[in-house]
Amino acid sequence: MWIPKFLIVSVLPLSALVEATALLEALKSAGASEFASRIESDPTVAAVFSSSDVQTVFAPIDGSVSPTVGRGKRQTNNQDLLYHGIKTSNKVGDLSEGSGKKLESNDKTANLDGAGQAAVSNPLNVTQSTTAKRWVGPIQARNFTNSTSKPLLKIFTGLGNDVNIIQGDIPYDGGFIQVVDSYFTLPEALSTTAIANGHTTFARLDNASGNASILDNTPTITCFIPSNAAFSASNGTSNYASSASLISGHIIPNFVGYLPSLENGAVHTTQGGTNVTITVQGNDYFVNNAKIIASNQILTNGVAHVIDSIIVPPTPTPVPFTGSASTLKGGNTRVAGMVLSALVAILAGF
């Protein structure tokens, strides 16, 4: 039977709307009605959230401040909404295991070889986040912790900023809602992130290296940023011939080492060709001699970690000479023979 085209077009959004309504209702019941309204107001975003591409939603509680990027510029394309829609199903227990979990979102503006932008959970502190089918109000969100309670489960986003899960594992037809106390911070480039977080010495050297723009636009990198105090307290810069070699000695290319991906004993080759070894001692992570003191500052093209000292490249192990005088080339053979003859003559005179 022939069906008018306009009827076909109207039927498809209706099916999506049915799924979206289940999520929107759950968000409103969970105290995230403002977030639900923003999703509902953008048909493109609503279609993504109603699809199987979103299985976990990190929903900012009502009253959360609208997000900004590092330069204070408000996003107008609802990129920040898609950053809250995670592709995989994650309950609070899943996010609390090990050294955390990488969460790939539906924000496709990242420079990660086609992967969506990521957020990372931080379970190093025991979580007090609870599970419930309904959030009971923003006033209690402010009073959820006190001086004696344990920290909430944190999710790291752009600039290393974090949000706290204040109510977890709220089910909806497509997966789970995790109510958080703020919007995710949109990631920035390495140079902008360093400046925004006050790492002025690194930012100056990065700019002086002439490679700042290249690093900002190279996909999938991991950067270890020495703090200002690290530069002031150490002569580690003497291990590098130039600012360019120092910066490249703190960059791992073709690898995004969110904290969960930094494994004990793993060896990575830096952009400068030196090797760094990851060591994990309890909850502490080291890169050669340097300790990570601030982790998971999510970048547009990877991740940065702040370290407490400049990475010292490993000293090359001398290779013992196992040849003989005959292996020397050219005039060196003649010189070796002359030295040997002179030594024999000297010994004969004793």
Image (cartoon, grey):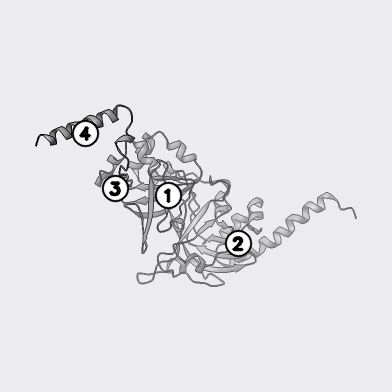
Mark 2 and mark 4 in contact (Cβ < 8 Å)?
no
**The residue under label 4 is which amino acid type?**
Leu
Q: Which image quarter is the C terminus in?
A: top left
Q: Residues within 10 Å of mark 4 (few under 14, many from 20)?
A: few
Q: Nearer the viewer, residue 175 or 147?
A: 175
Q: Nearer the viewer, residue 261 or 139?
A: 261
Q: Dot 2 corresponds to which residue?
A: 55
Q: CA distance from mark 4 to mark 1?
A: 46 Å
The numbered dot on residue 340 is 4
Q: Earlier in the sequence, mark 3 or mark 2?
A: 2
The numbered dot on residue 230 is 3
**The residue under label 1 is which amino acid type?**
His
- The image position of residue 52, as x and y in percent, is 65, 59
The numbered dot on residue 170 is none
Left or right: 12 as drawn, with respect to 97? right
- The image position of residue 46, as x and y in percent, is 64, 55
